[in-house]
Amino acid sequence: MKKILTLIGVSALGGLLTLGGYKLFIEENQSEQLAVEQVSDLPVYVPTNTTTNNSAAFTSSFVEAAEKSIDAVVHVKNTAIVSAPMTMSDYFFGRSQPRAQVGTGSGVIISPTGYIVTNNHVIQNANEISITLNNNKTYMAELVGTDEAMDIALIKIDADEDLPFLAFGDSDSAKVGEWVLAVGNPFNLNSTVTAGIISAKSRDLSGQNTQSFIQTDAAVNPGNSGGALVNTNGDLIGINTAISSRDGSYIGYSFAVPSNIARKIVNDIMEYGNVQNGILGVVGGALNSKAAEQLGTDITEGFYVSDVTEDTGAEKAGIKSGDIIKKIDNVEINKFSDLSGYLKTKSPNDVVNVTLIRDGDEEIVPVTLLRPSVTIIQPIGYVKNASEEDLKKYEADYGVKISEFNDNYKSDWYNAGVEEGSIITKINGKKLYSVDDVQAAIKGRGFNKPLLIEVINKNKEKVIYRL
């Protein structure tokens, strides 16, 4: 018996010594590894008392964010009256009959008084907009205003009580890899929450450098449009807008208008009735290895300025062709959508600090953003503010100038006696003094209402065209 007890004791002591030696070896290795990591260029992860990786913490964050968001996200029903053939006989004789067409989407309550932000495509062409809250109460909504370019619309309901709402977060501070929730009503399934991460920022899907979306892998499907993208604090950092798909359903990519852009659009619509854009006034493109080689520079990131637009803030601030813009304020500029996205959060007369590289030296140049002097009327082309000399030439007291025709309509206008340089004096009876008036007149027309454009032609005659 004593031998057995002695043998057990020796075995236990050996095990303890082995365990102690292993623990000491691991701690020494970890210390050496930490020392190596601290002097390397690789990022170092240092655990703290406020950081945890357990699933319970993530679950708690998701639950709190979802509970904060669900009641502020609404179901939007758009009813439009359209005319279309209803029978084979209608098709044969070319007849059309009116019928109701219903579309659905989502929206986000952004104030206790009933203002709701959604996508323009969710309510476009609506004769009637119906809103259903998460508590199943239904209200009729009125359209306050839209921004078709960024696909944002502002609508309002009159409720008999203060409504739950989401506060706008700072989308500029949102990071790639950060957890987010998409909240909406896909396939008419109310109050659906999906989770993912921010996959990228400043995504342009148009190919025309006009967009700057947040890309996520949170599942978004038809019906989610206009819903909320929130961070784990439950702050609104985006309005879900689009998916990339071959079949119309989610395949891994979804896109949201950043909250800073959406907030600025909403504020402009509420204060001015339309969006007030401030422009920098530079033309160019993003740098990469190939472009840098062609331009003879070693810099492969940034926005290369190839030209500066006349009478803009950039020209007045002394920005020149050949400058490379690296930052605007504290936002790094690596591609045009970084530049355009940040400028969409700014207004005319705002001052931004442009960090640029010129002749190898870094400079910071303050630039005052100005109102755009050019806009587009689709059936005509580019229209710009008219100078006193332009007005005098056509014997006009006010108006804007046709600077360049849309190629698709150029021959039609020339045949009508209207040439580039002609003056447009009115749209739908509203006098035009600047391109801002053009935008307001076009946005102010009713659905399916024509554009009545008064133009002074080359014979100095006022002619009204119905477009």
Image: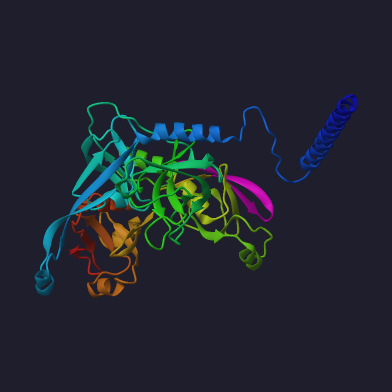
Q: Which colour scheme is used?
A: rainbow
- Which sits in the foreground, 80 or 396? 80
Residue at the extreme top:
2
- Which sits in the foreground, 259 or 271? 259
- Which sits in the foreground, 311 or 131? 131
Q: Can residue 140 be seen in this view?
A: yes
Residue at the extreme front:
1
Q: Is residue 127 above or below residue 139?
A: below
Q: In which quarter of the image is residue 131?
A: top left
Residue 183 in picture, x, y percent from top left: 39, 41
The N terminus, quarter of image:
top right
Residue 369 in picture, x, y percent from top left: 46, 46
Q: In which quarter of the image is residue 73?
A: top left
Find the magenta span and give its range. 349-366
Q: Quadrant of residue 184?
A: top left
Q: Is 202 on the left-hand or right-hand side of 434? A: right
Q: Is 454 on the left-hand or right-hand side of 299? A: left
Whether 143 is among the magenta residues is no
Residue 267 in picture, x, y percent from top left: 36, 38
Q: Can residue 280 be seen in this view?
A: no
Residue 60 in picture, x, y percent from top left: 50, 31
Whether 359 is among the magenta residues is yes
